[in-house]
Image (cartoon, rainbow, N blue to C red):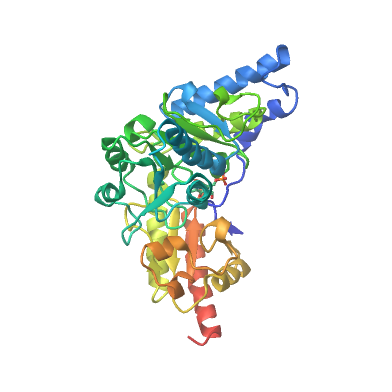
Amino acid sequence: MIFLDAAATTPVRREVLEAMWPYLTGEFGNPSSHHTLGEAAANALADARATVARALACRPGEVTFTSGGTEADNLAVKGISLARQAADPRHNRVVISAIEHPAVEESARYLERFHGFAVDVVPVDRYGQVTPEALAEVLRPDTALVSVMYANNEIGTIQPVAALAAVAHLHGIPFHTDAVQAAGWLSLDTKALGVDALSISGHKLGAPKGNGALYLRSRTRIEPLVHGGGQERGRRSGTENVAGAVALAKALTMVSVDEQGRSAAEPLAGRVAGLRDQFIRSVLDLVPGAILTGHPGERLPSIASFCFPGTSGESVLLELERQGVVCSSGSACAAGSDAASPVLLAVGIEAEVAQTAVRFSFDSTVDAAELEEAAAAVGAAVGNVRSLSGR
Ligand code: PLP
């Protein structure tokens, strides 16, 4: 099987499993316990926090461990907006982009339904980018928070996050970015990005599902969503997932990317981007009428996304799986749904064409030979689906 669905999830790396194993077995203490086992767990958690902080170029106290990207997004969007509203009831609008993951979009809609917020959606251009000018147009004195993702999970487009954060700050508004897909490929230097909050998720990076983190710039007020024993500096109660935090830290050290786009482990992003471009060229050559979605250059090394007019994305997926290639029609959350992807509609693709979308996403182990094989399979699969439907 050729697995080209790494944006949905990745297998746990052996080194990550080895790093977390002790905290699932012998060192199983609760970090809040005042005995040796508890202290060992608390130390492991502190080390993991320091490691994550290094990857995010921030202080350990600015890292909150969560149950994943969804929770980190919820905490940022709801928590910061509610804290700003509590401080000043006039702050009752949130700005999100038109292509956010549901974890951000639905958090904003929750604020609208239950807390009297208005949601302002900033449009994207045909490549899926938010321009600083478009963002400036929707900001208002009563905007509590701006949330624009770092890189999109369906089309891979990278946003000019530093420029967007600067626009929000000009108006005194905090800026959150969902970096779940960007992590491992782009620099997560929160200071260079200038963001106030940033979400990451472990299972996209070779850690298990169910762990993530939120960077929150110190002195940013936040209302917790989970109340209880006051763990994570009161921002997220509940006994900490020590093994999960250790796993996230280990996974991040294996994929961290510096300011120049250099990976700690290898020149990863450049190599994979080269393979992605070759794959894109092959697919466009082999499939008449194929459309590349997203930005041609400003895109994640790991995502190649297309529409294949005259097919249905789901039939192409089935056909590809029969040929041993596993990929996705868009986001894993929307897989199996018949509705056209809101992301593709937002970049101006017609609903009928949007239903023909297929996303291929890679991890660091991808190689040229398997992508060549996959491209040939795509050519054959689309040809088969088109001839079956008589187009
Ligand atoms: N944000 C983006 C951009 C994602 O791609 C995902 C997962 O697909 C999430 C958030 C949710 O992360 P998690 O699966 O850890 O809850």
Going 34% across and 41% down the picture, which residue do you hit? 142
Examine the image and state in which quarter residue 161 appears: top left
Query: What is the quadrant of the N terminus in the image?
Result: bottom right
The answer to whether 234 is drawn above or below residue 149 in the figure is above
- Find residue 104 and report its horizontal and vertical position in percent: 48, 47
Question: For the view shown, which residue lies furthest in the right direction?
Answer: 26
Left or right: where 267 falls relative to 138: right
Question: For the view shown, which residue lies furthest in the bottom direction?
Answer: 390
Going 60% across and 28% down the picture, which residue do you hit? 246
Going 57% across and 49% down the picture, which residue do you hit? 9
Regarding residue 217, the answer to whether it shows in the image is: yes
Regarding residue 308, the answer to whether it shows in the image is: no
Q: How many marks?
A: 0
Going 27% across and 41% down the picture, which residue do you hit? 167
Q: Nearer the viewer, residue 18 or 359?
A: 359
The answer to whether 319 is drawn above or below residue 1 in the figure is below
- Find residue 324 and report its horizontal and vertical position in percent: 60, 64
The answer to whether 123 is drawn above or below residue 222 in the figure is below
- Find residue 5 and report its horizontal and vertical position in percent: 55, 55
Question: For the view shown, which residue lies furthest in the front direction?
Answer: 89
- Find residue 270 and report its horizontal and vertical position in percent: 37, 45
